[in-house]
Amino acid sequence: MAITDMIEMKYVVASLLYSAIGLTIFVVTFVVLDLLTPKVSVWRELVEKQNIALAIFLGAVVFGIATIIASAIHG
Protein backbone atom coordinates (compact mmCIF):
# COMPACT_ATOMS: atom_id res chain seq x y z
CA MET A 1 0.00 0.00 0.00
CA ALA A 2 1.65 3.21 -1.18
CA ILE A 3 1.38 6.51 0.59
CA THR A 4 -0.40 8.00 -2.43
CA ASP A 5 -3.17 5.46 -1.99
CA MET A 6 -3.82 6.67 1.56
CA ILE A 7 -3.87 10.37 0.71
CA GLU A 8 -6.77 11.54 -1.38
CA MET A 9 -6.13 14.58 -3.51
CA LYS A 10 -9.37 16.33 -2.50
CA TYR A 11 -8.19 16.49 1.12
CA VAL A 12 -4.84 17.95 0.11
CA VAL A 13 -6.52 20.59 -2.03
CA ALA A 14 -9.02 21.41 0.71
CA SER A 15 -6.23 21.74 3.26
CA LEU A 16 -4.24 24.09 1.02
CA LEU A 17 -7.35 26.13 0.22
CA TYR A 18 -8.34 26.54 3.88
CA SER A 19 -4.75 27.46 4.77
CA ALA A 20 -4.70 30.14 2.07
CA ILE A 21 -8.07 31.53 3.19
CA GLY A 22 -6.94 31.57 6.83
CA LEU A 23 -3.67 33.33 6.04
CA THR A 24 -5.46 35.89 3.89
CA ILE A 25 -7.98 36.68 6.62
CA PHE A 26 -5.14 36.88 9.15
CA VAL A 27 -3.15 39.37 7.06
CA VAL A 28 -6.22 41.51 6.37
CA THR A 29 -7.08 41.57 10.06
CA PHE A 30 -3.54 42.55 11.02
CA VAL A 31 -3.54 45.37 8.43
CA VAL A 32 -6.87 46.63 9.79
CA LEU A 33 -5.41 46.58 13.32
CA ASP A 34 -2.44 48.60 12.07
CA LEU A 35 -4.78 51.10 10.39
CA LEU A 36 -6.82 51.49 13.58
CA THR A 37 -3.73 52.68 15.47
CA PRO A 38 -2.50 55.58 13.32
CA LYS A 39 -0.69 57.36 16.16
CA VAL A 40 1.60 54.38 16.77
CA SER A 41 4.10 53.11 14.26
CA VAL A 42 4.07 49.44 15.19
CA TRP A 43 7.27 48.57 13.34
CA ARG A 44 9.21 51.48 14.87
CA GLU A 45 7.91 50.71 18.35
CA LEU A 46 8.90 47.05 18.08
CA VAL A 47 12.24 47.33 16.30
CA GLU A 48 13.71 50.69 17.24
CA LYS A 49 12.21 51.30 20.66
CA GLN A 50 11.95 47.59 21.58
CA ASN A 51 8.58 48.05 23.25
CA ILE A 52 8.04 44.74 25.03
CA ALA A 53 4.52 45.62 26.19
CA LEU A 54 3.43 46.21 22.59
CA ALA A 55 5.06 42.95 21.52
CA ILE A 56 3.14 41.02 24.19
CA PHE A 57 -0.09 42.76 23.22
CA LEU A 58 0.41 41.98 19.52
CA GLY A 59 1.25 38.39 20.39
CA ALA A 60 -2.04 38.08 22.26
CA VAL A 61 -3.93 39.67 19.36
CA VAL A 62 -2.26 37.35 16.86
CA PHE A 63 -3.09 34.32 19.00
CA GLY A 64 -6.71 35.44 19.34
CA ILE A 65 -7.13 36.07 15.62
CA ALA A 66 -5.54 32.73 14.75
CA THR A 67 -7.81 30.91 17.22
CA ILE A 68 -10.92 32.57 15.80
CA ILE A 69 -9.92 31.74 12.22
CA ALA A 70 -9.10 28.14 13.13
CA SER A 71 -12.46 27.74 14.88
CA ALA A 72 -14.33 29.23 11.96
CA ILE A 73 -12.61 26.98 9.44
CA HIS A 74 -12.94 23.87 11.57
CA GLY A 75 -16.50 24.19 12.54
Image (cartoon, rainbow, N blue to C red):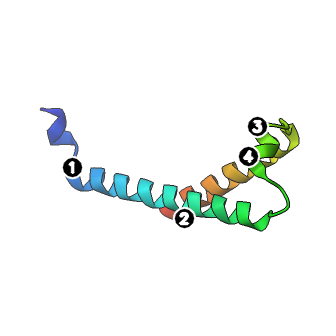
The numbered mark at residue 8 is: 1
Is residue 75 at all visible to an observer of this figure?
A: no
Q: From what the image shows, is residue 53 above or below residue 27?
A: above
Circles 1 and 2, Cβ within 8 Å, touching? The answer is no
Residue pointed to by mark 3: 47
Q: Amino acid at mark 1?
A: Glu
Identity of the residue drawn at 65% across and 58% down: 30
Residue pointed to by mark 2: 72
CA–CA distance between discs 1 and 4? 42 Å
Identity of the residue drawn at 22% across and 43% down: 7
CA–CA distance between discs 2 and 4? 29 Å
CA–CA distance between discs 1 and 2? 23 Å
Mark 1 residue element: loop
Mark 2 residue element: helix
Looking at the rendered image, the disc whose residue lies closer to the viewer, 1 or 4, is: 4
Instruction: Indicate the position of residue 70 as horizontal and vertical percent values.
Output: 55, 56
Q: Amino acid at mark 2?
A: Ala
Instruction: Indicate the position of residue 34 as horizontal and vertical percent values.
Output: 72, 60
Residue pointed to by mark 4: 43
User: Which of the marked residues, 1 or 2, is nearer the chain's N terminus?
Assistant: 1
